Amino acid sequence: MCFDAYFTSRTLENNRRNVWFAEYWEENFNCKLMSSSKKDDSSRKCTGQERIGVDSKYEQEGKVQFVIDAVYAMAHALHNMQRDLCPENSGICPDMELAGGKKLLKYIRSVSFNGSAGTGVTFNKNGDAPGRYDLFQYQWDNVTGPGYRIIGQWTETLQLNIEDIQWPGGKQEIPSSVCSSPCEPGWRKKLVKGSTCCWHCESCNGYEYQPDELNCKLCPYDMRPSANHSSCQPIPIIKLEWHSAWAVIPVFLAMLGIIATIFVVATFIRYNDTPIVRASGRELSYVLLTGIFLCYIITFLMIAKPDVGVCSLRRIFLGLGMCISYAALLTKTNRIYRIFEQGKKSVTAPRLISPTSQLAITFSLISVQLLGVLIWFGVDPPNTIIDYDEQRTIEPNLARGVLKCDITDLQIICSLGYSILLMVTCTVYAIKTRGVPENFNEAKPIGFTMYTTCIVWLAFIPIFFGTAQSAEKVSSLCI
C-alpha cells in the first residue's frame, strides 16, 4: 500500500514538520533523543539511523484507512466544487471562495469513489458512511490452531459463507435454535403447559389421522389412516377368491359330486325300465338326485362374487337342495312304514302309495321351503354389504372389508331349519322301519344314511358358529 511505503520511509530528517514524530520515534525504537525526553535514563540513545519496519515491528493502525478516505472525500468534494463553480479557471475563483461550508458539505455528501481498502465510499442523506463489517468466528484449525476466521461480511446486505462455518461436534447442519422442532406428519403437537412456543410431539396411533397440528382424530369406519397418518384412505375390499384354499377344496369336491350324480342319473336313464330301477321308486329317485345335484351346485353360488342376483340365488338354493333330498327320503321311509304297519292289520294296501301320490307329497313338503324363502324375500330383500368388523385388525394396514351377502348366521340356520326338521323326521321313520323284511331293501340304507347325516349336522353347527371368518364359514357350509 502507498501509505505503508510512505510512512516506513519517514525519518527524523525528512519529517521535521510533524512535532509528535520525535516522541513516536523514541516510543517505537525504545530509545532517547534528548535530555528533556520523558524516557528513562536507562534507555539507550537514539542514533537517528533506525528505520521503521526494519529495526522495529510495523503494523498499520486499523483506523488509518478511514483517515485516508476522509482526506480523499474532502479532495473529491473540492475538485467537484471547483469544476462546477470555476469551469474556466484552473484554481480557486471568487465564487468558490464565497461558497461557504454548507455548500462544501453538500459536495462532500455527494462524492462517490473507491476507498483505500478497495470498497466504495459514499454518504447517505444524514452524512453517514455505509456500515461495513467483517464477520468472524472463533474456530480451531489443525494447522494454525485456534483463532478467529472471517466467515462473511455485511455491507448493507449480509454475505455469509455457510461452508466456512464450523458447528459443534463437526456437524454440517445448522443447529436448530428453537424450543421445539416441527412435528413430523402423523405426530401432533402437545403444548407444554404455560408456553405456546414449546411442545412435545405425540404420534397418532391405530386408526387415528392428523387433521391439523394439534389433534388426532379417528378415521371414518370404512377408512383407515395412510402410512404416515396424515390422511384417511378407503379400506381395501376383498371377497372369497376362486384360487383360495377355502374355495378350491369345496369346488373340487363339488365337481366330483356333480360328475358322480350325472353318472348315476345317466345309469338310471339307461336302465329306466328295468325291474330293479322301477322297484326302487324311480320317480322319487330322480327327485332325490335332483336335490343332490342342487346341493353341489350351491357351492359355486357361495363362492361367486356377491351381488343382488347371486344373493337371491343363494337364498333360494341354500336350503332347497337338502329340502328336496330329505323330502324324497322322508316320503320313501313314510311309504315303507305305512305299508309295513298296514300289513300288520290287513291285506288292504294303504292310501297314497302310488308314484303320483308320492310325488305330490314330496312337492308339498318342498313347497313349504319355497314359501319360507318367498316370505324371507318380502321381509328382507336381498342385498350386499361390506363387513369391516370381520378383518378389522390392530394394524390398520392389514384391515380389510369383506364383500358378502346380507345374510346373518341366524338366517342361514333358519333357512336350513326346515331341512333339519325333515332330516330328523326321516331319521325317526328310519328307526321305526329298521326291522322291515328284506324285500324292502331300501329301508336299511336310508336309515344308515340318516344316522350318518345326523352326525355330520351335529359336527357342522358348532364348526359353523365357531368360525369368525366368512371364508371358513362358506367353506364349511359348502362341504
Image (cartoon, rainbow, N blue to C red):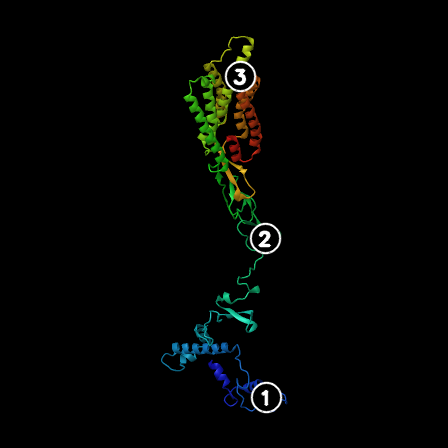
Residue 453 vertical position relative to residue 221 in the rendered view, above or below: above
Residue 199 position in % (x across, y down): 59, 53
What residue did someone put label 1 on? 31
Q: Secondary structure at mark 2?
A: strand
Q: Residue 246 in the image: state x and y as whole percent.
A: 50, 36
Who is closer to the viewer here, 76 or 424?
Answer: 424
Closer-to-camera residue (48/150): 150
Which of discs 1 and 3 lies nearer the camera? The answer is 3
Amino acid at dot 3 = Glu
- Disc 1 secondary structure class: strand
Cα–Cα gap, marks 1 and 2:
69 Å
The residue labelled by disc 2 is: 199
Who's the residue at 55% across and 74% down the image? 144
Pick the residue in front: 247 or 227. 247
Mark with earlier residue (1, 2): 1
Distance in Å between CA atoms under marks 1 and 3: 153 Å
Q: Relative to 402, does residue 149 appear above or below in the rendering?
A: below
Q: Position of residue 224 (x, y in %)?
A: 52, 43
Q: Position of residue 37 (x, y in %)?
A: 60, 89
| Disc 3 residue crowd, few under 14, some 14–19, many 20+, Cα 10 Å | few
Q: Earlier in the sequence, mark 3 or mark 2?
A: 2
